[in-house]
Amino acid sequence: SQGPISGVNKDIAVLQCHGDCDPLVPLMFGSLTVEKLKTMINPANVTFKTYSGMMHSSSIEEMMDVKQFIDKHLPSVD
């Protein structure tokens, strides 16, 4: 039987972001998650970005990276 990650999903692009000062979800867990993900889908399509000094929150830099990722991988809506 096929799991949720099969066929075309194997080539999906993934952006994972993590603050290096997150007290709730340590950076090590983000690193372990991205390594597991790379075994499930095409590792060339997985991007892991860390943000210096960011805690369990977000930042302008992260949101700009998310916007750039969306602009690159999703079709325009206009």
Image (tube, rainbow, N blue to C red):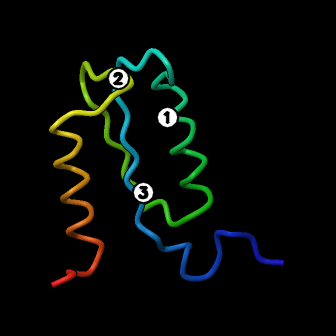
Q: List x then y, in percent, for residue 75.
A: 26, 81
Residue found at the very far right of the displayed protein: 1
Q: Quadrant of residue 21?
A: top left
User: Which residue is label 2 attached to?
Assistant: 20
Q: CA distance from mark 1 to mark 3?
A: 13 Å
Which type of secondary structure does the marked residue at label 1 adopt?
helix
Classify 45 as above or below 74: above
Disc number for residue 30: 1
User: Which residue is label 3 attached to?
Assistant: 46
Task: Identify the amino acid type marked 3.
Answer: Val
Left or right of 67 in this view: 14: right
Name the residue rendered at 37%, 45% in the picture: 48
Q: List x then y, in percent, for residue 58.
A: 28, 33
Left or right of 73 in this view: 42: right
Q: Answer yes or no: do the residues labelled 2 and 3 have beta carbons within 8 Å?
A: no
Q: List x then y, in percent, for residue 30.
A: 49, 34
Q: Judge by depth and name the residue closer to the eye, 64 or 37.
A: 64
Q: CA distance from mark 1 to mark 2?
A: 10 Å
Where, quadrant-wise, is the N terminus in this rendering? Answer: bottom right
First reached walking from the N terminus: tag 1 or tag 3: 1
Q: Quadrant of residue 49?
A: top left
First reached walking from the N terminus: tag 1 or tag 2: 2
Where, quadrant-wise, is the C terminus in this rendering? Answer: bottom left
Q: List x then y, in percent, for residue 15.
A: 37, 53
First reached walking from the N terminus: tag 2 or tag 3: 2
Classify 33 as above or below 70: above
